Image (cartoon, helix red, strand yellow):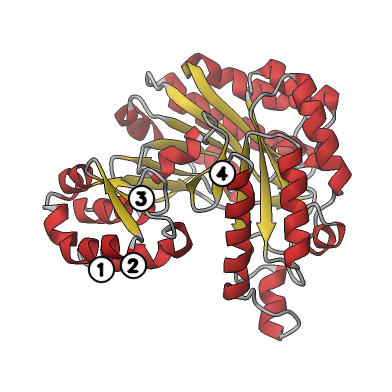
Amino acid sequence: MQRVNAGQVWRKLGAVPGLYVHIPFCARRCPYCDFAVSTNARADFRDSYVAALQTELETALGETNLRFETVFFGGGTPTELPATTLGRILASVLPHVAPDAEISLEANPENLDLRFLKALRAGGWNRLSLGAQSFDERELRVLGRAHDAKKIENVVRDAKTAGFQNISLDLIYGAPRTSLGSWRTSLRRAIALDVTHISAYSLTIEEGTAFGRAVSRGDMGAPDDDFGGELMDEAAQMLGEAGFERYEVSNWARMGFRSRHNANYWRGGDYLGVGCGAHSHFEGHRFWNERDAKTYVKAIQTQGTARAGEEWLTPRQRAVELVALGVRCRDGFSLEEVSQTGAFDARAALNGQLVALIATGALREESERIVPGAQGFAIADGLAARLVGQF
């Protein structure tokens, strides 16, 4: 596959709403994880990775007038690196960041204490996304997590003391032998922490993971879709009653605290990704880096780019994505935008299905936007399939 010259790509980009920075390091791999991670990496390799990452950033930021509205450090576990190292990486980005930018950091509770959190806040981060996953001790062990429920609560308290006003918790439902009662307990304890955002993701079994191998051997059952739906409904009810707005299938936020970075993905927006396995998108042009951390570092060192592949979406493909992602979001999708993007009349193409789905209440039309109805979130994948099948 033809490699993309990094400088040529960056010069094309101009203003890009989102920047994603991938830090792959983890103390260990969780049994459900299929992300681009590097476990138990030696200190010298971590230094080499950070140097390669900074080289990639310098190439991007030194040749353009990029300006970001959101920055997201994800992984992996970014907080496997010292706060001073993370701060150096962010410092090179801050001159290219809008004054009111959302600057997020993913973190695991076991890596954090008050001193670390104060350093992060002073370094420029204003949003913290904690991988809590559960407040049930047995589930935490099954999921391979290194923290306990009390540690989650302590970290949230310390984060607030350090000055973080925007804190998100990630939860996973459907772990082996999960009960409705344990899920309710996790939701209650998360709500009681008075955070601004909660994500609730269904456990997904991926090939090549420890859970995937266990399911293949018959040592573990696959998650039950019906029970998963019941758990999702419980989350929707409890979080709604607690004042959270469900603005995407798996995401709830207090007023004004939606994830701006993720919302840009769901709107089909442009973003730049740096680090191993990171993806970028610019007006239908997608390109991505080498997934393996060692391969990424060597490519940057020897070629100045770690670009592994690219693709150009057709106007119709981009329109399909706007619809498929839009039905998952409270704001839905704009018929006019889909028409302009795909170069066809979206209302005419979708009309039969739209009429039927609006009649059932699964979808609604609000000012030329198609949005999910009361039960739309629960069947979002099915709605997307029916709609995009018309294109």
List x then y, in percent, for residue 97: 48, 19
Residue drawn at the location 44% of the way across and 27% of the way down: 60
Residue 252 got which mark? 4
Q: Is residue 174 left or right of residue 119?
A: left
Callout 1 amino acid: Gly
User: The residue tagged with tag 3: helix, strand or loop?
Assistant: helix
Q: Quadrant of residue 257?
A: top right
Distance between the alpha carbons at the discs numbered 4 and 1: 29 Å
> In the rendered image, which residue does mark 3 sit on?
326
How many numbered marks have been drawn onto this rendered protein structure?
Answer: 4
Contact flag, marks 1 and 2 (Cβ < 8 Å): yes
List x then y, in percent, for residue 342: 18, 50
Contact flag, marks 3 and 2 (Cβ < 8 Å): no
> In the rendered image, which residue does mark 2 sit on?
385
Please name which of the two marks, 4 or 2, marks the residue nearer to the observer.
4
Callout 3 amino acid: Gly
Residue drawn at the location 81% of the way across and 34% of the way down: 155
Decide which of tag 4 and tag 1 comes sooner along the chain: 4
Distance between the alpha carbons at the discs numbered 3 and 4: 16 Å
Q: Eyeballing the image, is 18 above or below 100?
A: below
* Quarter occupied by the N terminus: bottom left
Q: Eyeballing the image, is 57 above or below 200?
A: above
